[in-house]
Image (tube, rainbow, N blue to C red):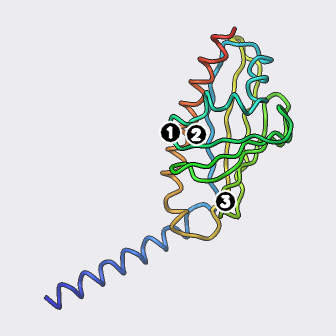
Amino acid sequence: MTRLLRLLVLGTGLLVVVAVVVGLFMPRSWSVECTRVLRAPQERVQAELLDLRNWEHWTPWSRTRDETLVVTFDGPATGVGSRMSWEGQRLGFGSLTLTAAHAGVEYEIAFRGVDQRTRGALALAPDPAGVRITWRDGGELGWNPIMRLFAPLFEAKLAQDFGAGLGRLALRVEAAH
């Protein structure tokens, strides 16, 4: 029994050391990008992006994912400086602020208790069928090897969320067209 316990402790310790070493060699940043063509005029899509009150209808982070979500808005009603803050049991506490608005929008996300901010953009470009939208997001992971080890899983899940969000955005702007 003692030998089995010793092997179990040694095996667990070795597994932790291997995970830390592998994590140290993983990238220190993460990024996600998803693109879709929308059959709508660029002006219509731009207007949708500039008003954060519309984001609840198409982003993956809404009351459909967290029924306890409470969202507040401050700053200008639309455009640069508009800010959306949220609080929910599943989605936590955070805020999104529009930082630029030109052929799409750029934003910064801050989460309570996290020093690193996430920066992203929804970029618009003309397309023969309407407008091509590219959603990019990324951030730093620092030196934490465990976070770096799980970054590929996080990126894959976020890419899936972005794809679903752009699909809902397409339904919204194409129906208005």
State left or right for residue 52 relative to residue 9.
right
Give the numbered dot on residue 112: 3
Residue 8, how many percent across, how many down?
25, 81
Could you tell me the amino acid type at mark 3? Answer: Arg
State left or right for residue 113 relative to residue 14.
right
Could you tell me the amino acid type at mark 2? Answer: Trp
> Residue at 51% of width from left, 49% of height from top?
90
Residue 15, how many percent across, how many down?
36, 74
Q: Which residue is mark 1?
A: 65
Could you tell me the amino acid type at mark 1? Answer: Arg
Q: Which residue is mark 2?
A: 61
Residue that sits furthest to the left in the current view: 1
User: Going from the N terminus, do you reach mark 3 or mark 1 first?
Assistant: 1
Which sits in the foreground, 127 or 177? 177
Pointer 1 local density, CA inside 10 Å: few below 14, some 14–19, many at least 20: few
Q: Quadrant of residue 121?
A: top right
Residue 168, how many percent across, how many down?
57, 24
> Residue at 60% of width from left, 60% of height from top?
27
- Separation of disc 1 and disc 2 at Cα? 6 Å
Say whether marks 1 and 2 touch (CB < 8 Å). yes
